[in-house]
Amino acid sequence: MPSPGLPRSDIADPALGDQGRRRIEFAERAMPVLGMLRTRYAGARPFEGVRIAACMHVTAETAAFARALTAGGAELHLAASNPLSTQDDVAAALVDEGIAVHARHGVDRAGYLAHLEAVLDAAPTLVVDDGCDLIGVLHTSRRGLLPGVRAGCEETTTGVLRLRQMAADGALGLPMVAVNDTGMQRLVANRHGTGQSTLDAVMRSTGTLLAGATVVVAGYGWCGSGIAARARGLGAHVIVTEVDPERGLDAVLEGHRVLPMAQAAVLGDVFITVTGNRDVLTAAHFASMKDGAVLVNAGHFDVEVDVAGLEAGAVEVRRRVRPHVDEYVRDDGRRLLLVAEGRLANLAAAEGHPAAVMDMSFAVQALTLEWLAGSDLAPGVHDVPAEIDAEVARTKLAAMGVGLDTLTGAQLRYLSSWQP
Ligand SMILES: NC(=O)c1ccc[n+]([C@@H]2O[C@H](COP(=O)([O-])OP(=O)(O)OC[C@H]3O[C@@H](n4cnc5c(N)ncnc54)[C@H](O)[C@@H]3O)[C@@H](O)[C@H]2O)c1
């Protein structure tokens, strides 16, 4: 039970707070931009009187973001966007600091939804979402709260896609900012963060030697292109599958082999889905895969690998042959290895994006919330102001000690002229 006076929370083990605090402080060392914001917020208190309900991965990096917001005066209520990514020690440390946390590692679907309801009980004035489930609940069972919510942010590609669909259907009742659609998010978080952390998950969970292996990456978007580049860097042969001709061409010109999944299925040692789409690896593909093939999903929802089809095609399922790995044995003896039950592997079987990457994502998110706290936008999906993205990139480069050139007056005039 939390100490008297702290807000209501639901976490696994309050005794883990010290361990969580050490983990958060270690992550904060790699997050200088957010650290600078936290210092400024502690003086300026831009979130005084603001109640934020957030659905996010409850990790050390998110905790650094939470600390910056509360330093600025926010009252924060945090639920987990994925039960498998929740770090229970971090949740405990945040509760110790007076943040309401509703997150337990491995909680079932009913528990997950109950946690979303619990953060909405706070009657938030701003919302932060990662995958659009919180917004979904707000627009269904908790519609009565909508008039009190000024605006919100959405972190990931799948969430933004769903928000745009809601807006097209006339169903979106508040202004939402697509944090995912910034340069910092796409270039840095999706490409470099997902690229590194997904391969980290493959290596940690299965110990696969990637050098010489054939890695099939389904979806050559921001995330997939990063994963493919990192896999090649580790010596893998990369095959890409795509449905979009421009992305497919891009992959070919990057030097990757591009094939339909039906052909790639026979060749791959490791399969990584990262499309944001469903049924990317299905029973027909499992039927032709090699013994020992590793199946990994890095897309937001656990719909990319048809786990029910995998189970239906197995004569035996050996759970946890290694941490996070289940083995599906087929009638001819072939074994297919599923990582993290087909959920976001880089968060479930590794630790998500490196803190140095989340520094920029969360700095954009914090500056966007600061902007939204005083905004009066119309319902719909909005972009992050370009200056916020540029400010974060500039601050990060400065923190890294990297200098850029500056446009001369003549160059500025040249770039803004049109006369022949
Ligand atoms: N694991 C993480 O940490 C992490 C981080 C960011 C985003 N995501 C998620 O990863 C997914 C992809 O994000 P993104 O930013 O790369 O999106 P994106 O739109 O840039 O790329 C997705 C690509 O998948 C392709 N695609 C769609 N259906 C396909 C199919 N059936 N077969 C092959 N290719 C297909 C699309 O044409 C597109 O090129 C989303 O669900 C997003 O929310 C995960």
Image: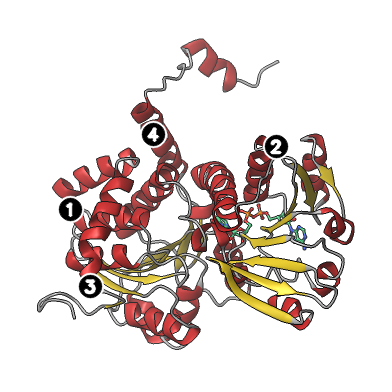
Quadrant where the N terminus is found in the figure: bottom left
Q: Identify the residue shown where x is 85% and y is 55%.
A: 264
- Please, what is the three-letter code of the amino acid marked with disc 1? Arg
Label 4: how many residues lie within 10 Å, few (<14), some (14-19) or many (20+)? many
Cβ atoms under marks 2 and 1 closer than 8 Å: no
Q: Earlier in the sequence, mark 2 or mark 1?
A: 1
- Please, what is the three-letter code of the amino acid marked with disc 4? Lys
Cβ atoms under marks 4 and 1 closer than 8 Å: no
Q: Identify the residue shown where x is 87% and y is 66%.
A: 288
How far apart, in angstroms, are the residues tagged by discs 2 and 4? 30 Å
Nearest the camera: 133 or 241? 241
Cβ atoms under marks 2 and 4 closer than 8 Å: no
150 sits left or right of 342 in the view: left
Residue depth check, mark 3 versus mark 2: number of the one nearer the observer: 2
In the rendered image, which residue does mark 4 sit on? Answer: 396
How far apart, in angstroms, are the residues tagged by discs 3 and 2? 43 Å
- Secondary structure under the numbered disc 2 in the rendered image: loop
- Please, what is the three-letter code of the amino acid marked with disc 3? Pro
Q: Position of residue 202 (x, y in %)?
A: 60, 54
Q: Earlier in the sequence, mark 4 or mark 1?
A: 1
In the rendered image, which residue does mark 3 sit on? Answer: 14
How far apart, in angstroms, are the residues tagged by discs 2 and 1? 49 Å
Q: Which mark is residue 235?
A: 2
In the rendered image, which residue does mark 1 sit on? Answer: 45
Q: Earlier in the sequence, mark 1 or mark 3?
A: 3
